[in-house]
Amino acid sequence: MVQSSVLGFPRIGANREVKKAVEAYWAGKLSADELTKAAADVKKASWTNVKSKGVDFVPSGEFSLYDHVLDHSAAFNVIPKRYIGLGLSPLDVYFAMGRGRQSDGVDVPASEMKKWFDSNYHFVVPEFSEETDFKLNFNKAVEEFTEAQAAGITTRPVVLGPVTFLALGKASKDAKPGFQTLSLLPKLIPVYETLLADLKAAGAEWVQVDEPILVLDKAIGFESQFSATYNALAKVAPKILLTTYFARLDSNLNYVVKLPVAGLHIDLDRAPGQLDEVVAAVKPTNIVLSLGLVSGRNIWKTDFDAAIKLGQKAVDALGQERVIVATSSSLLHTPVTLASETKLTAEQKDWFSFALEKAAEVATIAAVLSGSQDSAIAAALEANKESIAKRRAFEKNSDDTVRKRVAAITPDQLERKSPFAVRKDIQAKHLNLPKFPTTTIGSFPQTKEIRQARAKLGKGEITQEQYEEFIKKEIETVVRFQEKIGLDLLVHGEPERNDMVQYFGEQLQGFVFTQNAWVQSYGSRYVRPPIIVSDVSRPHPMTVKWSSYAQSLTKKPMKGMLTGPVTILNWSFPRADVSRELQSKQLALALRDEVIDLEKAGISAIQVDEPAIREGLPLRRSDWDNYLKWAVDSFKLATAGVSDQLQTHSHFCYSDFDDIFPSIQRLDADVISIEASKSDMKLLTTFKQYGYSNQIGPGVYDIHSPRVPSGQEIKDRLKAMLEILPDSLLFVNPDCGLKTRGWKETEASLINLVEGAKWARENYA
């Protein structure tokens, strides 16, 4: 019999219960015990709901109050020295690592965050050194397994694999030069042995060990590490399901099939072409093959016919007992349930499948592959066939005007009129900015009052005119504040925007939106990704009114603020029926029109943010060139239709630029701003290595933490930057937008930023 499994489930709660509880705890409105109770309720509901859909392997152990990698670091005692001896409880140490802390005499910054492979989920980067003292502070896998058992559900625990844990980490500041994180495997394996042996003793039959590092090229050199690790763990552990996702195994398969594991999971949503090779490789072994047939990354209904055909290949080769039907990855990346959506049309709702619906899908596909004659399964198959047929019929409709415009794109449309060296002088005269010009990334705090006004508009409690008057006052407050503290290049603060992607999607043709389809981005930060359902176009200007109004309030230059085409694409749920390249270029043309209209309206600088351009990079290097070609072309298409005096900006965060630096240069933005402080400015070494001719604003403080940086911290960072970057190119700005911060900390931080820039002007004239 073919079994079914879910690799992980959203941990936010159907009504964002975890976000509310965590933030209430941070605010001192909820005790630690009450927070634990709220988490327990969400976990129990998730286990119960997944089981109710007929899933055989229900996951446990992957729940988190903030981040599962941070959980792993806390459990294995990977706690940097700066968080020890502060008099904090273990829970508060945990949160301090994730978001920093500045209260009750404690002042400590947050740890670095990075993107989880090619997703928009951020994980907290573990820090290792020769002195790292691994020990099991608590066994989360056992705790949640027994917690689920008490609720009457036997689960399959999920554990982050040791090789991936070390490979995703970084050397701490006290590590010796040349230290390699994987050198710690011999110290780490015994702790894993204890964890897994305890899990087996608790009654777990299987354990899901996630090793997504296996889909990266660099894992080619990890054969000896994987062999040593799993030969040791297999002796004491429950049956191990070695789990990969997001890409294909490629040549790493050659050594993976030699490991003493009971099962192997592969992602057939992102990499369906690997099936035949993997089936052939595992056939001579006793390895059970878990097939990721249901997408853990998108929200479209699974095409049962296509999935069953793939699954049947494996069943024919291996037999039913050696096949599991699964989600391609954890469902962390999808909303909780479609049942919460009441405003989608019946037609639209029929297209989608969220996490709980995907659990039902894996159970149905497994039943079909097991030869089920159940009438309910037959009915589900028929209903799915009808849904897919309707969706395919809708997909055949296209906007000929948009398609023809994409087809008519010429190379000239991708290039500015003059090279940067010429543009820089023209822009300097036009903008008249001082040396070390100060600016922000765009957004200012989204206060409770702003959110309430938006909600009242949605409920019809205030008119559009009343709402717009409110927004004007908010913009004026932001402009006057920036003038008061002495910022040089201003922004309007974006009070009218709910989200940097959603706001634009709502004004473009081709998108639909949800009410409650929240997905975790990091910590308690959740987003509702728009869904691209058809060809994209701009029916009217989207930002011109507000940017023009803001510019009318001040004589200082105002930046227009846009989200770039690649980021809108990557932070939406994209179409599955056409290429990402086509969708990106449609978005780029819509934004090109907006950029041109902003310049016509008197805006002298425009920021087109692309924080997701690195995130969208394929995980296999052989797939990079095509992506980078169309991604960079999309940005250039959006920004190149303006005069030389228009200064273009772009923003990037949490990205490893080393590998794609030539592509960042090819964007030809006049100014780029990057995250730098949270990662200890390590990105700047890339700019030193390659050189960078255009202007750059490395972030001087971390906005993802509520702590206020001291003036001396900012001066120290500027001094370090000026040892690497030419002073003529340097802008001074925070790491990212200020939307999630409060006004009090924003004011204090920006005042210190402005003072830091003044200090730099005085000392680097």
Image (cartoon, rainbow, N blue to C red):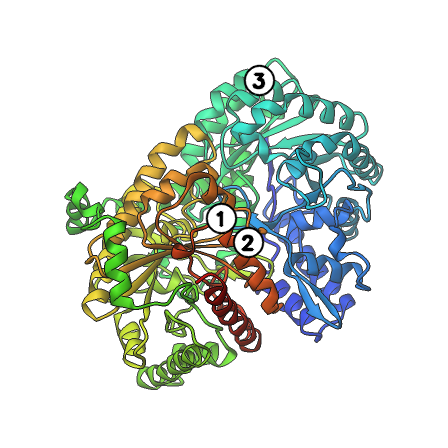
Quick one: label 3 or label 2, which is nearer the N terminus? 3
Numbered badge on residue 720: 2
Gap between marks 3 and 2 measured at Cα: 45 Å
Q: Position of residue 453 (x, y in %)?
A: 43, 81
Mark 3 to mark 1 CA distance (whole Å) = 43 Å
3 or 1: mark nearer the eye: 1
Front: mark 3 or 2 = 2
At label 2, which amino acid type do we have?
A: Ala
Residue 724: image tag = 1
Can residue 371 be seen here? no
Q: Secondary structure at mark 1?
A: loop
Is the Cβ of the residue at disc 1 closer than 8 Å to that at disc 2? yes
Image point 37% across, 38% down: which residue? 662
Amino acid at the residue labelled 1: Ile
- Tell me if residue 469 comes above or below residue 64 in the rendering: below
The residue under label 3 is which amino acid type?
Asn
